[in-house]
Amino acid sequence: MSRAKRKKKRVFGTSERPRLVVYKGIRNIQAQVVNDENGTTLVSASTIQKDMKKKLKHGGNVEAAKAVGEAIAGAAVSKGIKKVVFDRGWSLYHGRVKALAEAARAAGLEF
């Protein structure tokens, strides 16, 4: 069994504690809060969105990750979501992923 599959078995989002999924591409970074029980996306934020594109010069750097982290946390807290399970996927907890996580924590999410 691959490492990714072993990790995926342990990380599961419920209605009480949904999963904060981070996808890191070369030019963009995306985050979603997902309820795996229902298979629904509750909140999402990305550097591809129009308001983020206007605000950011480049979508694939640490500043963009911080902006996405603040945006996802603000949207989640406004929907009443405070505790999440962090799913970094295959990415290391370093650089952009770490910046997004710290910005989300500073904006009110607990994980």
Image: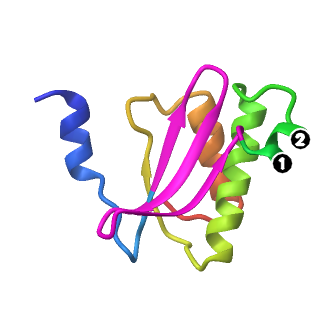
* Relative depth, front residue between 28 and 62: 28
Q: Is residue 85 above or below residue 27?
A: below
Quick one: SS at disc 2?
Answer: helix
- Viewer-proximal residue, 41 or 84? 41
* Residue at the farthest top position: 26
**Could you tell whether 12 is left or right of 23 in the image?**
left
Q: Horizontally, is 104 left or right of 39 in the view?
A: right
**Considering the numbered disc 1 on the image, is that residue within a helix, a strand or a loop?**
helix
- Disc ID at residue 55: 2
Relative placement, left or right, of 40 versus 58 is: left
Q: Position of residue 73 (x, y in %)?
A: 65, 61
Q: Main secondary structure of the magenta part?
A: strand
Q: Amino acid at mark 1?
A: Asp
Is 23 colored magenta in this rendering? yes
The correct choice, above or below, for 2 with respect to 111 in the image is: above
Residue at the image point whose x is 69% and y is 25% from the top: 60
Residue that appears at 41% across and 70% down? 17
- 71 lies left or right of 51: left
The correct choice, above or below, for 108 with respect to 106 in the image is: below
Which residue is rendered at x = 72% and y = 30% of the image? 62
Residue type at numbered disc 2:
Lys
Q: Mark 1 = which residue?
A: 51
Region rendered in magenta: 20-48
Q: Residues within 10 Å of mark 1 (few under 14, many from 20)?
A: few
Mark toward the viewer: 2 or 1? 1
Labels 2 & 1 near each other (Cβ < 8 A): yes
